[in-house]
Amino acid sequence: GAVVSQHPSWVICKSGTSVKIECRSLDFQATTMFWYRQFPKQSLMLMATSNEGSKATYEQGVEKDKFLINHASLTLSTLTVTSAHPEDSSFYICSARDTGRTDTQYFGPGTRLTVL
Amino acid sequence: AQSVAQPEDQVNVAEGNPLTVKCTYSVSGNPYLFWYVQYPNRGLQFLLKYITGDNLVKGSYGFEAEFNKSQTSFHLKKPSALVSDSALYFCAVRGYSSASKIIFGSGTRLSIRP
């Protein structure tokens, strides 16, 4: 199947700093990417839909100024957690939709963020 | 509105026995249905999907799922479970529109005992 990479796989940062997470579709172009957050033993919560060349669409309750999303190319979307706090600690997973061949969403391996 | 229900938080099966992980859905129109598997501290891996055609869909690692329109179900099955199948399984549904968002079930933890 198609491959989506995510970097870094884990990050530990101090409270108040910003963290950038990259999501890349490696063998297909993705006009649409998605960012999810997953709490322990829970399902995935959609945070935002990232559209190449336009502004992201955020789900209700997600602060757009805190979770900055940029989708500058057809293979790269970034999520920046600004002024991170301990409550932002979570597992963040990106996904890319392959609308060309399979019309299926493929997921990255996730990024474990720990804010001290 | 779209929704997905996975009624079992956990399913326990002995290695070598058949397994079933249940999923029911609600969506307007014809659904896209998916199963994903998640191993600890990893993202989701695509297992299989149903869009149209045969109701029995075969996927990765010997898994299959049966689409039942009258019961609005899409149960995941495998004839003979392996210990390595132990993981968290998510059922998901999406509408036909390219703008539709994928909705996940709450997940079912599958535990295969040797």
Image (cartoon, rainbow, N blue to C red):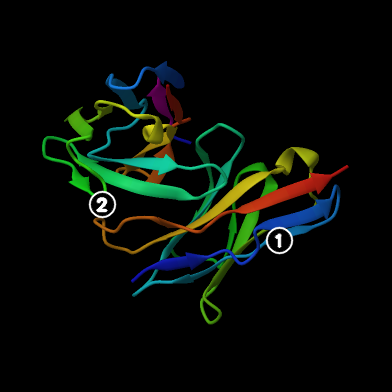
- The magenta region covers A3-8
Residue that appears at 57% across and 63% down: B6
Instruction: Tell me residue A105's x, y (percent).
Output: 39, 45
The residue identified by callout 2 is: A59
Chief SS of the magenta region: strand
Q: Nearer the viewer, mark 2 or mark 1?
A: 2
Per the model, the C-alpha gap separating discs 2 and 1 is 33 Å
Subunit that carries the residue with mark 1: B
Crowding around mark 1 (Cα neighbors within 10 Å: few <14, some 14 to 19, many 20+) is some
Instruction: Tell me residue B99's x, y (percent).
Output: 24, 56
Q: Quadrant of the N terminus of chain B?
A: bottom left
Q: Is residue B15 visible?
A: yes
SS for tag 1? strand
- Given residues A29 and B13, the one toward you in this image is B13
The residue identified by callout 1 is: B20
Residue that appears at 81% across and 54% down: B13
From the viewer's perspective, tell me whether residue B55 is left or right of residue A64: right
Furthest-left residue in view? A54
Q: Quadrant of the C terminus of chain B?
A: top right
Q: Is residue A99 visible?
A: no
From the viewer's perspective, tell me whether residue A67 is left or right of residue B61: left
Q: Amino acid at mark 2?
A: Glu
Please tell me whether residue A89 is drawn above or below residue A15 in the rendered image.
below
From the viewer's perspective, tell me whether residue B66 is left or right of residue A63: right
Please tell me whether residue B3 is drawn above or below residue B109 in the rendered image.
below
Q: Is residue A85 magenta?
A: no
Circles 2 and 1 on the same chain: no
